[in-house]
Amino acid sequence: MENTLNQDMKNLENYFARNKLSLYVSKSIFMLIGTYQSLAKCEPISVRISNSELDVKCAKYLGMQVDENIKWGLHVDTICRKIACKVGVLKRLIHFATRCHCISIVGMQKR
């Protein structure tokens, strides 16, 4: 499977070169997704484009942090950090702003 994937990557590189397209290797990723048990049975796969390995353990996809075992921990941690930042700002602003201002800052104002 690894040889087939790497050959497909070479074909993609050639296609991009022939059609004067850019391939952003830094934005390209490869991740095997499955349960812990199924991934433990698999041999490690090394997929390369332009001598750069694409293997990652987690990636952001459509705004969600996805890891190889499809666990929610990383995504929940990311959301909690974002929320904690905004709550901290509101906590500091509450003494200086009216309730109406705080609601509009959060973006919960009904229109």
Image (cartoon, rainbow, N blue to C red):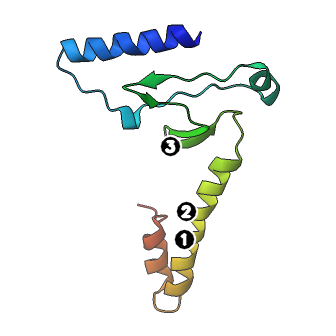
| Tag 1 residue | 85
The first of marks 2 and 3 along the sequence is: 3
Extreme residue in the front direction: 51
Disc 2 residue type? Lys
| Tag 3 residue | 63
Name the quadrant of the N terminus. top right
Disc 1 residue type? Cys
Is 46 placed left or right of 33 in the picture? left
Can you say whether 65 is above or below 90 in the image?
above
Can you say whether 27 is above or below 15 in the image?
below
Relative image position of residue 56 (x, y in whole percent): 56, 36
Q: In which quarter of the image is residue 59?
A: top right
CA separation in Å, label 2 and label 3? 13 Å
Secondary structure state at the residue bearing disc 1: helix
Residue at x 27%, y 11% (from the top left corner):
15
Relative image position of residue 67 (x, y in whole percent): 64, 38
Check if mark 1's residue and mark 2's residue have beta carbons within 8 Å: yes
Tally of numbered tags: 3
Extreme residue in the left direction: 20
| Tag 2 residue | 82
* Residue sitting nearer the eye, 33 or 87: 33
* Residue sitting nearer the eye, 6 or 66: 6
Can you say whether 25 is above or below 63 in the image?
above
The first of marks 1 and 3 along the sequence is: 3
Extreme residue in the bottom direction: 95
Relative image position of residue 47 (x, y in whole percent): 51, 22
Secondary structure state at the residue bearing disc 3: loop
Disc 3 residue type? Gly
Relative image position of residue 84 (x, y in whole percent): 60, 69
Secondary structure state at the residue bearing disc 2: helix
